C-alpha cells in the first residue's frame, strides 16, 4: 500500500529524514514515534508529496514524486489542526472540500454520521468544540473513500475525553480495513491503534517493533512516593533494598523507582514485612520519551 525506500530529506546540511525505508501493507496500522525533531512530520509530508526528497515513495503503486496527484487521491490526511473558515457551516465545509478534492457524489449526512457528527450539519464551525473540529477534519479526509489514512499528532490539542473518543473512532476505521500511518507522542494512542511502531531519532529509524512490545521497549518506569511512619522507614528501606530496589528518603517516606510491570512489588515486600503504607503517589515516566503523569491514591 505504501512503500518507502531510502528516503532522505535535507534542510541545508541537516537530514530531517535520513535513509528511511519501510512498508505499510493494506490494513496495517503503523505509528511513528519519537521526540520533537525526530523526523515524524517531515516523513509524513514526504509521503504526501509536499516536500521534494531523495529516494522513492509509492502509494498503491503510484510514485509520489512523478504521480503525486494520483498518489494523494489514495490518501486521507488529517493534520494536527485543519484551518477552517469559522463562519462556514459544517455541511458547507464538506461540500467545499469535496469540490476541491474532485469528489463528485457526496451524501453529507452519511459522511458526518461516520464520524459522529450527525445532527451538527447546520452548525457554524465556530460553534464546534475542538474534538468536533477534528471529527470534521476526519470526515473531510474520508471523502472519496481513500484506502489510507495519514494522521499527524491529531489529538495534540484535545482534552482527555476528546482524545479517547477520537481514538475510538480511528480504531473503528482501522478495523474496517483502512491502512493507518500516524505520528503520535501519546503512549495510549500508540498501544490502542498501532500494530507496529517505527521509532525515529534524528531522522533515522532506530527500531521497528510490534505494538505489544512497545512499552517494554521504552523501558517505562514508575516512581513511587511511599508515605511510611517515621519509626518504620529504616526497616522499610532495608527490606526494599533486599528486594532489589534502591529506595531514597524524601522527608515523609521513601521514593522507589520500579519498572511499570513491577509497580506492586514494593507494596508486597512491605506487606510481608508488616510495614504499613499510609499513602502513596505514583509518577509514571520515561527519561526521554514521555511526559510525567501523576495520580495520587489514599488506601
Image: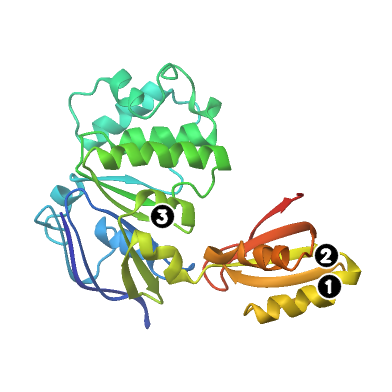
The answer for how far apart the CA atoms under marks 1 and 3 are is 39 Å
Measured as percent of width and height from the top left, residue 240 is found at 70, 75
Q: Earlier in the sequence, mark 1 or mark 3?
A: 3
On residue 37, which mark appears?
none
For the point 43% across and 16% down, which residue is it?
Answer: 119
Label 3: few (<14), some (14–19) or many (≥20) C-alpha neighbours in 10 Å: many
**Is 183 left, or right, of 103 in this rendering?**
right
Q: Which label's residue is closer to the chain start, 1 or 2?
A: 2
Looking at the image, do the residues carrying marks 3 and 2 touch, with CB atoms under 8 Å apart? no
Residue count near mark 1 (Cα–Cα under 10 Å), binned few <14, some 14–19, many ≥20: some
Residue 49 image point, x, y percent: 24, 58
Mark 2 lies on a secondary structure that is strand
Q: Marks 3/2: CA distance?
A: 36 Å
Q: Residue furthest right?
A: 231
Image quarter for residue 176? Answer: top left
Q: In which quarter of the image is the N terminus?
A: bottom left
Give the CA distance from mark 1 to mark 2.
6 Å
Asked whether the beta carbons under mark 1 and mark 2 sit within 8 Å of each other, the answer is yes
| Disc on the earlier residue, 3 or 2 | 3
Residue hosting label 2: 228
- Of badges 3 and 2, the one in the foreground is 2
Q: Residue 233 carries which label?
A: 1
Callout 2 environment at 10 Å: few (<14), some (14 to 19), or many (20+)? many
| Above-or-below relation of 124 to 48 | above
Residue 12 visible to the viewer: no
Q: Mark 3 points at which residue?
A: 190
Q: Which residue sits furthest left?
A: 61
Amino acid at each position: 500500500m505504501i512503500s518507502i525506500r531510502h528516503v532522505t530529506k535535507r534542510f541545508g546540511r541537516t537530514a530531517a529524514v535520513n535513509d528511511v525505508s519501510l512498508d505499510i501493507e493494506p490494513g496495517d496500522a503503523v505509528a511513528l514515534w519519537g521526540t520533537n525533531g525526530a523526523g515524524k512530520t517531515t516523513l509524513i509530508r514526504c509521503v504526501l508529496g509536499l516536500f521534494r526528497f531523495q529516494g522513492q515513495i509509492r502509494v498503491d503503486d503510484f510514485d509520489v514524486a512523478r504521480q503525486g496527484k494520483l498518489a494523494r487521491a489514495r490518501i486521507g490526511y488529517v493534520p494536527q489542526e485543519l484551518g477552517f473558515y469559522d463562519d462556514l457551516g459544517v455541511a458547507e465545509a464538506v461540500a467545499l472540500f469535496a469540490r476541491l478534492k474532485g469528489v463528485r457524489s457526496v451524501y453529507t449526512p452519511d459522511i458526518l454520521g461516520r464520524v459522529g457528527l450527525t445532527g451538527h450539519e447546520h452548525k457554524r464551525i465556530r460553534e464546534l468544540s475542538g474534538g468536533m473540529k477534528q471529527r470534521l477534519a476526519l470526515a473531510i479526509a474520508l471523502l472519496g473513500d481513500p484506502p489510507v489514512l495519514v494522521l499527524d499528532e491529531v489529538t495534540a490539542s484535545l482534552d482527555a475525553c476528546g482524545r479517547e473518543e477520537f481514538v475510538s473512532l480511528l480504531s473503528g476505521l482501522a478495523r474496517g480495513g483502512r491502512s493507518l500511518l500516524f505520528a503520535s507522542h501519546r503512549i495510549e494512542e500508540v498501544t490502542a491503534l498501532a500494530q507496529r511502531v517505527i521509532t525515529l531519532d534524528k531522522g533515522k529509524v532506530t527500531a521497528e517493533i510490534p505494538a505489544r512490545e512497545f512499552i517494554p521497549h521504552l523501558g517505562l518506569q514508575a516512581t513511587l512516593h511511599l508515605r511510611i511512619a517515621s519509626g518504620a522507614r529504616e526497616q522499610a528501606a532495608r527490606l526494599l533494598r533486599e528486594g532489589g530496589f534502591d529506595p531514597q528518603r524524601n522527608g515523609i517516606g521513601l521514593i522507589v523507582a520500579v519498572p511499570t510491570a513491577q509497580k506492586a512489588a514494593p507494596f508486597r515486600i512491605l506487606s510481608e514485612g508488616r510495614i504499613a503504607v499510609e499513602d502513596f503517589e505514583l509518577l509514571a515516566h520515561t527519561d526521554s520519551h514521555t511526559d510525567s503523569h501523576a495520580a495520587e491514591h489514599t488506601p
